[in-house]
Image: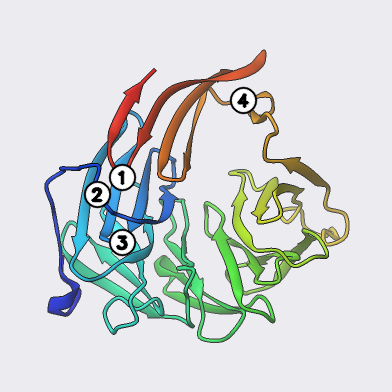
Amino acid sequence: MTIESPSGTLCPTEQKFSKNDETELYSVSWNQDYSCFSAGTSQGFRIYNCNPFKETFRRDLKGGKFKTVEMLCKSNVLALVGTKADAQLSPNNVIIWDDHQSRLISRIDTVANPRGLCSLSNDLSACVLACPGLKCGQVRVEHFGLNLKKMISAHDSKIAFLTLTADGLLLATASVRGTLIRISNSMDGTLLQEVRRGLDTADIHSIALSSDVRFLAVSSDKGTDHVFSLRVRMLGENTSADSELIRLSRLFDFSKQWCQSWFIIVFHESFYRCSFDPVNGGDMVQQEHVDFLKTETRHI
């Protein structure tokens, strides 16, 4: 894999690990159906399958690092944001890369993007990408299937986090102030709903939208998660003032609320697969734990 210069060369490596492996983890991103995840590291990036767990492939970059790696479903198309301040892997670019053909599809210039902000739509019928624009508080949305580009002035302050719905039609954003979360129409930039996380400034770590766009969850450095009820799909209603807010501690037992037979958590370079009874609830049972940068798998 080469990105326009000898210093930007990516190549496969043998899957050998040691306890002296000093690879540093920068980011983790799920693919659209949560069957795989990507890890941006100090040496390049890696792609993992979740069940059964295994490293699918990796690309090591000589002299470069990736802040963000986003997959397009299970395809070989990736969105990459670097950390080096050079022409090839600048954090001010989003690189759209076809890993199968080793081909640069597109390069998008952004404002300074140290967080590596980038989001891809989840719907196979739509290919939508969102990333910071060229101005403070601006988001650039690319609807590739429609050949449509939209610049959305989402906030007055710098963007701290952004994410798209599965179909790419809605954009959720937060600024570095961390007090307001805004949901906009990604086609025309119309503000559809605004919810308040709190009055104090907070560092937003993540924003997640449910697949049916009924709920929006926000985590921050305040030690609590917020879940908002959304009504942006209902036309003709004033949704900005009456969103239901549920404050959840990080220790809340989610297994009694979400009817799923299993789920996966990635945290501090660890991968966990757990199961629980969706009817009767109770404690979760750990089935697998992997320190995935070392790939030392332990089955329970």
Query: Whole-Å distance between the Cαs marked 3 and 4?
Result: 37 Å
The spot of residue 7 in percent (x, y) is: 16, 76
CA separation in Å, label 1 and label 2? 8 Å
Cα gap from disc 4 to disc 2, whole angstroms: 38 Å
Q: CA distance from mark 4 to mark 1?
A: 30 Å
Residue at position x 35%, y 29% in the image: 51
Query: Sequence order check: which comes first, mark 3 or mark 1?
Result: 3
Q: Amino acid at mark 3?
A: Ser
Q: Amino acid at mark 1?
A: Leu
Which quadrant is the C terminus positioned in?
top left
Q: Quadrant of residue 12?
A: bottom left
Report the residue marked by disc 3.
42
Q: Is residue 47 above or below residue 253?
A: below
Q: Tell me, yes or no, whether the two marked residues, 3 and 1, touch with CB atoms within 8 Å.
A: no
For label 3, the crowd category at 10 Å Cα-Cα, with few meaning under 14, some 14 to 19 and many 20 or more, is many
> Residue 117 placed where, x, y %?
49, 67
Q: Earlier in the sequence, mark 3 or mark 4?
A: 3
Which residue is denoted by mark 2 in the rendering? 21
Q: Label for residue 293?
A: 1
The quadrant of the rendering that contains the N terminus is bottom left
Instruction: Confirm or deny contact between disc 1 and disc 2 (CB under 8 A).
Output: yes
Contact between labelled residues 2 and 3, with CB atoms less than 8 Å apart: no
Question: Considering only order in the chain, which callout, 1 or 4, is on the residue closer to the N terminus?
Answer: 4
**Residue bearing the label numbered 4:** 259
Determine the residue located farthest toward the top in the rendered image.
280
Q: Is residue 268 left or right of residue 276?
A: left
Nearer the observer: mark 1 or 2; the answer is 2
Secondary structure beneath label 3: loop
Say what secondary structure mark 4 lies in.
Answer: loop
- Left/right placement of residue 280 relative to residue 99 reads right
Disc nearest the viewer among 4 and 1: 1
Q: Residues within 10 Å of mark 2 (few under 14, many from 20)?
A: few
